[in-house]
Image: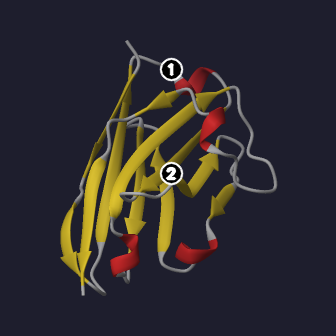
Amino acid sequence: QVQLVESGGGSVQAGGSLTLSCAASGVNFIASSYCMAWFRQAPGKEREGVAALDSAGSRSYVDSVKGRFTISEDNAKNTLYLQMNSLKPEDTATYYCAARRWCRLPETMPSSSIYTYWGQGTQVTVSS
């Protein structure tokens, strides 16, 4: 079965760094075009797209994380990463990995509704 598993979450002080990982299994993303993304959701708030990439090389970031977060992938390991630097308390949320086959990113970040595969989430807490 298709499975996305996030790891790397934790608790850090403001200004610190974390790197999240998302390992994919049960699906061959190399065989087709794809989009992969990181979303986050804080209590009482809607799920928000943070960063996304596609197999054509496009990258997208929400304005609030530009210059601080970097999305990347390791095809050999079938793993997606989110490097988070200069973390702020506002970044506190559960972070989810998402993916979709046969996908190319539009000019703006797509909503969560286009993604068909989701991980269970990893918690990131940033203290002031």
Q: Position of residue 9 (x, y in %)?
A: 24, 57
Q: Residues within 10 Å of mark 2 (few under 14, many from 20)?
A: some
The amino acid type found where label 1 is placed reads Asn
Q: Position of residue 121 (x, y in %)?
A: 32, 44
Of badges 2 and 1, the one in the foreground is 2
* x 43%, y 43%: residue: 97
* x 41%, y 35%: residue: 78
The amino acid type found where label 2 is placed reads Arg
To which quarter of the image does residue 127 belong?
A: bottom left
The residue at the far right in this view is 107
Q: Is residue 22 left or right of residue 126?
A: right
State the residue position of label 1: 28
State the residue position of label 2: 47
Q: How is the image coloured?
A: secondary structure
Mark 1 residue element: loop
Give the quarter of the figure containing the N terminus: top left
Q: Position of residue 26 (x, y in %)?
A: 39, 17
Give the quarter of the figure containing the C terminus: bottom left
Q: Position of residue 110 (x, y in %)?
A: 70, 47
Instruction: Compare residues 124 and 3 and report the one nearer the observer.
Output: 124
- Above/below status of 44 relative to 83: above
Instruction: Compare residues 44 and 14 and report the one nearer the observer.
Output: 44
Mark 2 residue element: loop
Judge whether residue 87 can be spotted in this image.
no
Q: Is residue 109 left or right of residue 4?
A: right
* x 35%, y 61%: residue: 93
- What is the distance, in whole Å, between disc 2 and disc 1 at their CAs? 26 Å
Judge whether residue 23 can be spotted in this image.
yes
Q: Is residue 95 left or right of residue 33?
A: left
